[in-house]
Amino acid sequence: MKTQCIYQLCFYLCIALFVSCSSEDDGNSNDSSDNVITINIAEYPSSGDLIATINSSLEGTLTYNISFETASQAIILNGDELRVGDWLAFDYETHENLLVTIEVSNGSETEVLEYKIAIQNVDDIWAFLNGSSRTAYENANNGDWVLISESEYNDLANYLAHTTKSGASDDQIYNNASVESASGDRTVANNNDFSIPSNSYVFAFKYYSWINNVSTSRIKLSQDDSGGSYQDVGNVLPEHNDEYNHFVIKGANSPTTSEGFIGMYAGGSVGAKDDNNSSYKWRNGNVDNLDNTASGKVYLHQGLSTTLKQWD
């Protein structure tokens, strides 16, 4: 009887081992990821950058065709090369991966190759800065404002995802009216329809300074009411000169909880324009609440905010 039990036990163990091995083999044979070629690439490459050279097992004169891709025109072909097409598609917050299928043919045979472009996340603000601006941003502490160029500010405004402009609109800033001097040492905020959406991060600011060597100005933010209460956004602005100045903040981590209004404490005289359709709130000094309202003028300052945090 013992011998029969031992035989039965060995039989069942063999059956279990066979089923286990069969399951593992089936799992591997159905794993299509083994045939996908994965390539890592950082966010926001330049259009035309080389992604990979296509290696086919076919012989003869080959033709290449894209039969599928996650985002249209994100990846383009240049002969046997995969290159960046629409660089904006390489945004980690929009696509963590881009998939593309290539059909290679020699006229009689066709080979299908699948690529997964794994996008490596970077600080999106950093990605749009260059040279000294990027270095200053890298060296800044959280809460520091960094002076950047006009073109860098415009790139952030135009290309960073889910961005809203507040304060003064582009039409108000760039209309044909003359820039006039407005008093400094006061806190001001435009009282118009260009506000900050709820759950937004303020990350950039620009304004027109009338004087040089300004070193005490601050960005202000109020929620629910354009009259206040205003709180400082980050630290004091770095020293800057007359005309338009552009800034980004390092490490914006606190989103608005309701509709917000951008303002500033102007340490010196600032630029404004006549505008019959605009009004503003103001009060002398670096204050939290703006008790005075005036109309017919727009202060030339603008904030950028986004509902999607895209930095460290």
Image (tube, rainbow, N blue to C red):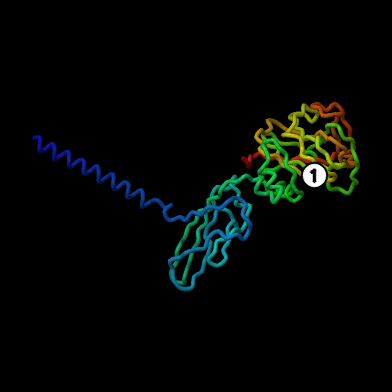
Task: Describe the element under mark 1 as helix, strand or loop.
Answer: strand
Q: Nearer the viewer, residue 156 or 247?
A: 247
Label 1 sits on residue: 245
Q: Residue at x 68, y 43 (%)?
A: 137
Q: Quadrant of the N terminus?
A: top left
Q: Quadrant of residue 187?
A: top right
Task: Looking at this view, name the residue that lies furthest to the bottom.
Answer: 60
Q: Nearer the viewer, residue 185 or 189?
A: 185
Q: Is disc 1 surrounded by few (<14), some (14 to 19) or many (20+) residues within 10 Å? A: some
Q: Residue at x 85, y 42 (%)?
A: 212
Q: Quadrant of residue 252?
A: top right
Residue 85 coordinates in the image, percent (x, y): 61, 58
What's the amino acid at mark 1?
Answer: Asn
Q: Residue at x 84, y 48 (%)?
A: 174
Side (left or right) of 101 relative to 44: left
Q: Nearer the viewer, residue 155 or 75?
A: 155
